[in-house]
Image: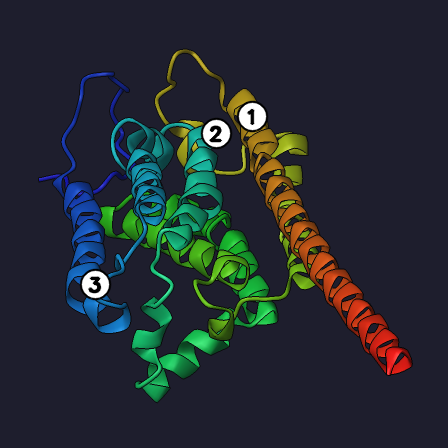
Amino acid sequence: MTWWCSARDVAWTWSWQAYPGVWVFVAALVLLYVAAIVMLGPRHTAPDQRSVPSGRIASFGFGILALWIATDWPVGALGAGYLLSVHTVQYLLYTFVAPPLILLGLPRWLPLVLEPRPKAWRVLRFFARPFVALVTVNAVLLVTHLPPVVDGFRRSQLGSFTIDLAWLFAGLIMWWPVLAPRPESGRLSEPWKIGYLFLTTIVPTIPAGFFVFSDFPIYALYELAPRVQGIAAGADQQAAGLLMKAGDPIIWLAMLAVFVRWSIREAKRDERDLAEHRRAAAKGRDGGEGTRAE
């Protein structure tokens, strides 16, 4: 039984294939989310409030959908052993698309569940540090794109699953300082978020450069794989290099969203301060007029 997408030395066919392990993995994430809402939500919300707003549930659903698309047939099968460009699409979905949507879908009260557990809370806070998050996501990116790792791990179901899981783990860690449900669980302030997000765009340039400018295919796995739709290994690798930087627009949009949200909040704060100043000035004038009248 083939449970997870991995490299196969057979000609590519568009005939659908079942990967039950992918379905179990996706279903387990959904069940954990539902169980957390049903069992833990009432403890952390008022009786007249919903445990999770519908918008967050929708965001989590889209994140799981992106994860499913990246893992199941045909994207998962093509990326695991046929096309490096699709492998890169998987990386983008696992790191830049699914994690932010999943984190936006988490209930705001969820980190509170870990506060009574000091060890778990310390682990969360450790990985939420921007420096640790940057080192982790960049280390996972570079290690999982080393030729021995790709050529070796992608050939087995367990190895391919390990790479996919490492990408998801790194993506969640990368986005946590920006999208943590609660500020005290590791979220940065807005100016630091912008700088942090910019730093995440630097290291992916390294593998992208190798993919685009290398004279020969880097991975034997994708060089020797049966060709799909006549796409040559060299062209496939160059396309993968261009796609590797496709995560940058996602980061730029996130930076823009952070800046706009920060500007709106600062403008509202300035309006409140100005209104309080005017009320204080008016009160002072009224008091002065009352004194003169006496």
Q: Which residue is mark 2?
A: 85
Q: Image check: 44 left or right of 184?
A: left
Q: Which residue is mark 3?
A: 36
Q: How far from the left and from the top, in percent, is residue 124? A: 42, 74
Q: Earlier in the sequence, mark 3 or mark 1?
A: 3
Q: Amino acid under label 2? A: Ser
Which quarter of the rendered picture does the N terminus lie within?
A: top left
Please identify the quarter of the rendering in which residue 36 is found.
bottom left
Figure colour scheme: rainbow
Instruction: Identify which residue is drawn at 16% across, 45% down.
Output: 21
Q: Amino acid under label 3? A: Ala
SS for callout 1? helix
Query: Does residue 202 appear anywhere in the picture?
Result: no
* Of residues 280 and 125, the one drawn nearer to the viewer in this rendering: 280
Q: Earlier in the sequence, mark 3 or mark 2?
A: 3
Q: CA distance from mark 3 to mark 1?
A: 41 Å
